[in-house]
Amino acid sequence: MAVVSWKEILLLTGLVVGCYWNSLSCGFVFDDVSAILDNKDLRPATPLCNLFLNDFWGTPMAEERSHKSYRPLTVLTFRLNYLFSELSAASYHLLNVVLHAIVCVLFLRVCRLFLDNTSSLVAALLFAVHPIHTEAVTGVVGRAELLSSIFLLAAFLAYTKSTGADHSIVWTPIALTVVLVAAATLCKEQGITVVGICCVHEVFVAQGFTLPMLLDTLRHVLQGKGGFPYALLQTLLKLIVLVISTLLLVIIRVQVIQSQLPVFTRFDNPAAVSSTPTRQMTFNYLLPVNAWLLLNPSELCCDWTMGTIPLVESLLDLRNLATLAFYSVLGLLSYHSLRYKNSSAKTVIMALSLIVLPFIPASNLFFPVGFVVAERVLYVPSMGFCVLVAHGFRIVSHRGRLQKISWLVIGVLLTTHAVKTFCRNLDWHSEYTLFTSALKVNKNNAKLWNNVGHALENQNNYAKALQYFLQATRVQPDDIGAHMNVGRTYKNLNKSREAEEAYLVAKSLMPQVIPGKKYATRVAPNHLNVYINLANLIRANESRLEEADQLYRQAISMRPDFKQAYISRGELLLKMNKLTEARDAYLRALELDRSNADLWYNLAIVNIEMKDPSGALKNFNHALELNPRHKLALFNSALLMQESGEPKLWPEANRRFLAYVEEEPDDANGYFNLGMLAMDANENVAAERWMRKAISLQEGFRSALFNLALLYSQSRRERDALPVLDELLRHHPEHVKGLILKGDILMNHQKDTRGAKACFQRILRADPTNVQGKHNLCVVYFEEHDLPRAERCLEETLALAPQEEYVRRHLSIVRGKMAAMSAAGQPLASVGAAGEETVERASEEGPEEEGRGAVMVTGGAEEEKNVRKSSAERQEGVDQSEPLGGGRAEGRTRGKSTKQMKDIEQKRAAALRRLEEIERLLSSD
């Protein structure tokens, strides 16, 4: 075996980089979204063992909705990418390009086993630039093919060293082969087929047998004319070891999928559910279709499902001729390679084994798969194709007159393929470019119309997306998913009636209830989302909540493990104030998926509504254990700790708010609540900094502006408080507490009774029954020495709030003062200094208590982020339901801590003592 030189390695690597460097600018498209963006197994918070329990897409293998694609080593490389660059697509694409270069070098070394140096290099160069590989290399999920191919080729190379110089068996390479086969299979299932390639090599290449020789030997043994040759016995022993190892791998693989095949629908693979002979003719016709893609990769498409390739329903269909031609060529090549013993025959048999054996799992001939044609599964079979092309080139180039022509043809082929590959990478730049390029090749695939619509939907271009979704329903009228997409888009366009009609059409296409039937075998899990979407739509109407609940229950009855149905029903039950049932729904969902942080979060919301803060905090902590960066759990658990009034919890609440603002640096609510915590801890400098930050992020932030003004007032910085209050009232002119606080500062600190009067009068214009505003206006009259008007005002206030003792007391003071002045013959238009003190202190009681107790809220009444809401798991095709407790939580205020209550009581007591002292002074007068 000739060694691969550094020059050849550099040539192959340079060619790969030249063809694929523009793929580094591509994003995550198509299946990358599910495998990378939505796959929790990539996150460091997910235990590594989950990679060996879940499928390629992060779904537990035990769940029936699992795709059953078991590729933990591939997912592990995604996780390493995430560790270094999180979701930077460029790093994922770069690693794919590197892996493709490695495969090319290994393939060159394999080709050297049965091709000369020049022909093997031609085969490797053609493999490096073949456009059919763009899906495997430029699509990130194609890494499964790349990794599996590396271990497959390495396993084959290891096996070729299992025969010693004296023709004895060398067991170390065989053991290494078994390990590498297992690794290849853990990257992608087709990796196990390398065992068959090793068997073909052992029998027909290493031992040099031909099919006639094997038949003659078997005939002689059966006739008793002799035994098996020693070389054949050695071969059988090695093959038995390989076969037993393969069977063990197959048994383990079957155990992993729990003896269940994934659920596919007729939309994924129409021929799979067709009757005989349509199914057989269509599946056999797909073989020449795949062969044509290798021969002429001019029209490539990312999705060949649904109506891309019409079914072959008649024996008279001309496409059957293509099938016959394919099998004829395959038969001739097989006959040539199995009958003769020369090097050409060995090359052809190895090429055919590389084409046929790795393709068998994806061929649909032995069991159905979830696609009709997939370009990336041709990655390994294309190796055999390249070997055949290179072998043909060697034969032709050795004929004198055709030598130059053969080199010219190869040069043109490599150039055109390289250019096609480079241009094809551009199609994978975004989902929109990918699917629109696919529609140029095939307009009969409703899935492509849907996917272009999804791409436009992600750009919030709902009107144009709707056109594509509607076209999908015209191309495939019975496509449930297309009608669901139409309904969702109408909903996004605020056309509820049209949305409901579209959902009802989709629902009518669902299988009808048949007693004793298992729905999971006939209904794709994502199609059941039509019940969720329809229920989420109609539950916006309060009179249709029971109807929505019925839809959720219908989905659950069709599929008891339908987790999303429990999640959405839990939200609805909470809205209906059926708290116990809501809790039970979430507990049932947690039985299906205890590793879902969103479910623990939603259960915590139910606990809050059930007045169980300790249970809520416990479930918030569960969510954070599973996902330490769960933003809603961080925020609302910190909010709950802040509301508890327990100072020992405040440091942890502060830590969680800090973690929240790290995740959401532009959310003013996080900084506002940090400011509130700092105020609770009397850390005024920090409180001011956080409040200022919140206000800078959200202009006119009502709670932040008021509490910052209150902070200044309590810190004896009344002059600083006034500009803040002016800004507050500019954005919120009727803010009662702001007007009261401003009036108090103007009257008691600025001696501006006119400005104070304007504040209190504005309150009463908005709310004539506001007791505090009315009382403080009475105080202004007192300050203006208008005792009769102050008396009438206090009488009106007492009528509004007969239970308020301080109003009655102030009225008594004013009347006593009026009586004393009348008895002394003094005009009622004058008042002493003591009266001024009385007025000043009496007005202080209102804003002090209300401002600190009722106004220092966590923002729940002002800002939507402080409303606790659901974090329902998002699935493809499921409308996002509204937040948990969306309406009821808005008026929520933060309860007072023990320290706050003591402060308020102390201030009340001090105010009462001052009033008693003033009463004594008045009596002495």
Image (cartoon, rainbow, N blue to C red):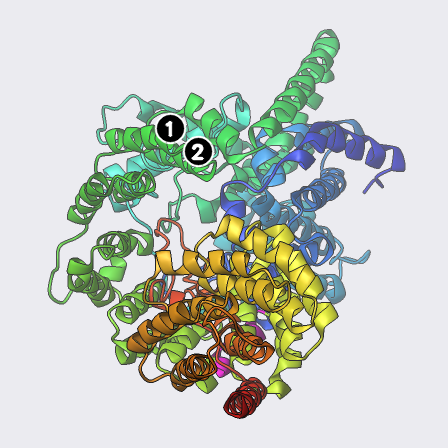
Residue 183 screen position, x and y as percent: 64, 60
* Image quadrant occupied by the N terminus: top right
The reply to whether discs 2 and 1 touch (Cβ–Cβ < 8 Å) is yes
Query: In the image shown, does 565 or 15 lie closer to the viewer?
Result: 565
Residue at coordinates 57% horizontally, 88% vertically from top-left? 914
Amino acid at pointer 1: Lys
Q: Considering only vertical position in the picture, is 98 above or below 791?
A: above
Query: In the image shown, does 98 or 473 lie closer to the viewer?
Result: 473
Q: Which residues are magenta?
A: 617-627
Amino acid at pointer 2: Leu
- Say whether residue 860 is left or right of residue 196: left
Query: In the image shown, does 80 or 659 lie closer to the viewer?
Result: 659
Q: Considering only vertical position in the picture, is 300 above or below 833?
A: above
Q: Residue furthest top?
A: 401
The image quarter in which residue 805 lies: bottom left
SS of the residue at dot 1?
helix
Q: Residue furthest front?
A: 825
Q: Considering only vertical position in the picture, is 878 above or below 560?
A: above
* Image quadrant occupied by the C terminus: bottom right
Residue 113 screen position, x and y as percent: 74, 41
Disc 2 crowd rating (10 Å Cα; few below 14, some 14-19, many 20+) is some
Residue at coordinates 48% horizontally, 34% vertically from top-left? 302
Residue that badge 2 annotates: 456
Residue that badge 1 annotates: 464
- Magenta part, dominant SS: helix
